[in-house]
Image: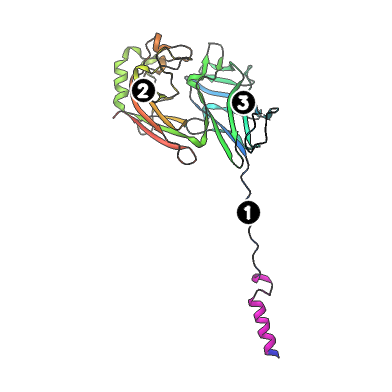
Amino acid sequence: MKCAIWILAALLVGCGGGDGDSATAPLPEPAPAPAEGLSIGLSDAPADGVSHLILQMHSLELTPGGHMGGGHHGGGDPIVLDMSHHRVDMLAYQGDDAYPLLHQHQLEPGRYQLRLHWTPGTGDHGSYVDDGEGRHPLHGDHPYFDLGEVTIHEGQHHNFTLEMDLRQGLHHNGEHYALEHHGMRWVDNDTMGHLKGTVDASWIADCEADNASLAGPDSQFVHVAYLYPDGTTLAQMDDIAPAAADGQVAPLATSWVHQDHNGDWVFGVGFLPAGRYQVGYTCLGHLDQPDSNEAADGDFALYRDGGVVIIESGEGGGHHNTHRCGG
């Protein structure tokens, strides 16, 4: 009888009849479905002679648009998010770097019109610019940026970047600075890439030698790369005026060309929609002013056609592309 009892107990333990470590572990909880939402970053390209550009944000306005399949909005009152705690030095976020203005904010699926409000400067309050002559209030044609429409799909998160080319958008009238929409790009991060380019040193030397009489103060030149739509010829490459001259093509983006720690002449443009572009180079960037068209009325000109640039986004966006001008 004792032998039968021990055999029965062993069978019960072997079949999970006991307690403790022999119990079956519970199944893990399923991962939560991805939340619909939106993230927004701010990035820029630098401006001439400016050390700081402080943007004091005010609010982000999201206005529901028309109804979408699977969406819940058929139009309605704006959703207003307080952005006043964001005070951004735009010159600290260049190239492929971006300031996280909005991070994973949940939204119901649908279409939204976006408007980003900022606070113009008055004295040391609000937005301002620091340059070699001190601090100046920053104003604008409108104290907001219309970012356009975004579509939030069910179960997806969306990332966008507002890229500001300050060489094109920042204007100075001698008293204050104005920030205009000219030169701004609203980019879907999933379909964009970054560009790092180099310019052959012989182009640098030849441009300076051929334009010696056009050097800036202290005989200095300002080397700049300009990015144009694919197929733009050297003769068609215009400057950063608010509107292109007849028969000319305005640049989509610009970037300083400077020497890095290896002595190479490099430039970079961040957050470019995937596609084909044409690049131009000049050493006469100091002659190119955003308020006027020097290519048509002055001595400014693009010096060399740097060829076709192909921007690939890569999986999920953000691919780093390279290009060489000359050599």
The dominant secondary structure in magenta is: helix
- In the rendered view, does 92 fall on the left or right side of 210? right
Which residue is found at the position 67% from the left and 78% from the top? 12
Give the extent of the magenta segment: 3-22
**CB under 8 Å between callouts 1 and 3?**
no
Residue type of the residue flagged with mark 1: Pro
Q: Quadrant of residue 175?
A: top right
Q: Dot 1 surroundings within 10 Å: few (below 14), some, or many (20 or more)?
A: few
- In the rendered view, does 309 fall on the left or right side of 66? left
- In the rendered view, does 73 fall on the left or right side of 138? right
Q: Position of residue 155 (x, y in %)?
A: 61, 42
Q: Disc 2 marks which residue?
A: 281
Secondary structure found at label 2 = strand
134 or 231, nearer to the observer:
231
* Mark nearer the N terminus (2 vs 3): 3
Q: Disc 1 marks which residue?
A: 30
Q: Is residue 141 above or below residue 3?
A: above
Residue type of the residue flagged with mark 3: Leu
Quadrant of the image for the C terminus?
top left
Whether residue 204 appears in magenta in the rendering, the answer is no
Q: Position of residue 54 (x, y in %)?
A: 58, 24
Real-space Cα separation, disc 2 to disc 3, in angstroms:
33 Å
Q: Is residue 201 visible?
A: yes
Q: Disc 3 marks which residue?
A: 116
